[in-house]
Image (tube, helix red, strand yellow):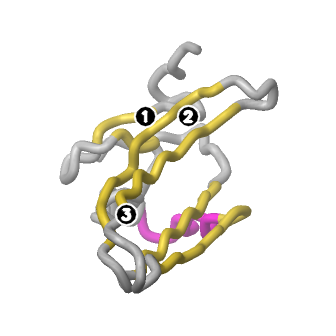
Amino acid sequence: MTAPGAGAAGATRACPHCRETILASAEVCPACNHKLRFGGPVGELAAPAALTPLRVEGSFRNPADSGAWEYSMVLTIRNERGEEIARRLVGVGAMQPGEQRTFALSVEMNPASAKRTRH
C-alpha cells in the first residue's frame, strides 16, 4: 500500500494537539475534537456535513457473581479483497463484578476536496 501524496484524497498529517494521524483535509481532529482550521474567506460556502454511514454501539456487564474480566478493543479495517489495511488496539481494561462498559464505533465520510489549505 502506498500513501497518497500531499493534496491527494486520503493524504494524512499529524494533529498538532494530540499527534494522532488524521486526514490532511480535516477541519476538526476526530481523536481530540480540537478545531484545526477556521473558516475561509467571507462568502465561501461551508463544508458539507459529514455523513455517518456506519454507527454501532453496544454494552456489556460483567455478571455480579463472576470474577474480574479483562478486555481488549481491537479495530480492523479491510479492503474489498478482504486484505487487512489497518489494525489498531484501541484500548484495554478490566471489569470487576457488576461493572458495565459501552463501546461505540462510527465511520464519518466527507467528499474529498481538490482544494487544500495549510493550518
Q: Is residue 40 left or right of residue 110?
A: left
Asked if the residue under mark 3 is in contact with the one under mark 2, i.e. CB atoms within 8 Å, the reply is: no
The foreground one among 35 and 33 is: 33
Q: Is residue 12 left or right of residue 60?
A: left
The foreground one among 116 and 29 is: 29
Is 44 part of what is drawn in magenta? Answer: yes
Could you say where residue 60 lies in the image, as x and y percent from the top left? 52, 76
Q: Which residue is label 2 attached to?
A: 10
The foreground one among 111 and 98 is: 98
Which image quadrant for residue 30? bottom left
The earlier-in-sequence mark between 1 and 3 is: 1
Q: Please tell me whether mark 3 sits on a helix, a strand or a loop.
A: strand
Q: Which residue is label 1 attached to?
A: 12
Amino acid carrying label 3: it is: Trp
Which image quadrant for residue 62? bottom left
Q: Which residues are magenta?
A: 41-50
Could you say where residue 104 lies in the image, as x and y percent from the top left? 53, 69
Can residue 24 be spotted in the picture? no
**Which numbered dot is residue 69?**
3
Is 97 part of what is drawn in magenta? Answer: no
Residue at 56% across, 63% down: 105
Could you say where residue 92 lies in the image, as x and y percent from the top left? 33, 54
Q: CA distance from mark 1 to mark 3?
A: 37 Å
Can residue 61 be spotted in the picture? yes
Could you say where residue 4 lies in the image, as x and y percent from the top left? 53, 22
